[in-house]
Image (cartoon, helix red, strand yellow):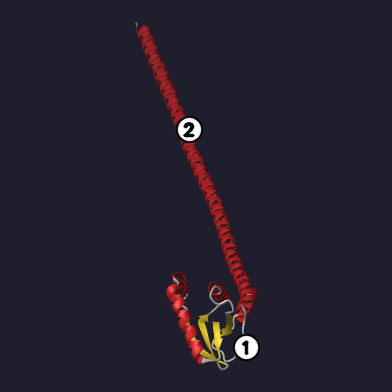
Amino acid sequence: MKFFIIVVMLSTMLFSGQKQIILGSYSVESNGERALKTFKNQIENDMQLQGFMKDNSLRTINTEISGYTVVSLNAFNSYTELLNTMRVLKVYYADAYVLKYPTKNILLAESFEDVAKKAKMEEEAAALAAAKIKEDEDEEKRIELKKLLEEEALEAERLKAQSIEEEVVQKEETMEESLEETVLAEEVREETSQEEEDASSMQEYMMYIIALALLALIAAGLTVVKIAGSKSSKQDENE
């Protein structure tokens, strides 16, 4: 930022205020007016010069500086504009020079060579400023890209952590389901075992009942046989 400010200050110092191009200076006012009329006729008769004047919004006037009547074009805001215009006018006015606009001192002149040097310095300063701006823009883009990459990395980490958490939860749910299935299977097994034990106990009880019934039948049979034998013996004795 400081570098950019220095470049701007340098450019401002090079071109301190508006400038005007002096085509001629005349000690006699009428000569100055005649020179202005001649230049305007040149503009009317030269389509290229006329187009250049119009495209750059240039105007020609007569002013008095240090007691001289001068024919000038004004006003310019940079040495680059000045240089381009002087290159065109050099065909018609080889001795044209530059003065601050407005000014009262005709001695503070800048030649074509002075303008060319300062225009070059101005262009270099502008190029440095443009390069600095581009560098700053590139730095901003790098910062934005770095920030974006960091955000993407954080998002990836968040998604990874979320995925791990979901995986852990899923495993816990799977373990709980497996545990529930194991408990349910154990309960079913215990119920089946209990039923089998109950069935076995019932079977033993039935066998016991049947055995008692058989014993009762046998005892009853023996009693009947015994009674019958006793009756038979009594009959034999009576006979």
Q: Is residue 197 above or below residue 2?
A: above
Relative image position of residue 180 (x, y in whole percent): 49, 44
Q: Name the secondary structure under disc 1.
A: loop
Relative image position of residue 79 (x, y in whole percent): 58, 76
- Residue 18 visible in the picture: no
Q: Nearer the viewer, residue 101 or 171?
A: 101
| Identity of the residue drawn at 59% across and 61% down | 146
Q: Which mark is residue 3?
A: none
As shown in the figure, which amino acid type bears the numbered disc 1? Leu
Left-right relation of 222 to 126: left
Residue bearing mark 2: 197
Q: Which quadrant would the C terminus be assigned to in this image?
A: top left
Q: Is residue 198 above or below residue 234?
A: below
- Residue 25 visible in the picture: yes
Q: Nearer the viewer, residue 15 or 148?
A: 15
Q: Name the secondary structure under disc 2.
A: helix
Q: Is residue 223 above or below residue 168?
A: above
Relative image position of residue 83 (x, y in whole percent): 57, 74
Crowd class of label 2 (few under 14; some 14 to 19; many from 20; radius 10 Å): few
Dot 2 or dot 1: first in sequence order is: 1
Q: Which quadrant would the N terminus be assigned to in this image?
A: bottom right
Residue at the limit of the structure toward the top, as seen here? 239
Crowd class of label 1 (few under 14; some 14 to 19; many from 20; radius 10 Å): few
Distance of label 2 from label 1 (alpha carbons): 132 Å
| Identity of the residue drawn at 62% across and 88% down | 107
| Identity of the residue drawn at 45% across and 72% down | 46
Q: Which mark is residue 107?
A: 1
Q: Nearer the viewer, residue 57 or 165?
A: 57
Question: Which circle, 2 or 1, is nearer the viewer?
Answer: 1
As shown in the figure, which amino acid type bears the numbered disc 2? Glu
Relative image position of residue 71 (x, y in whole percent): 51, 85
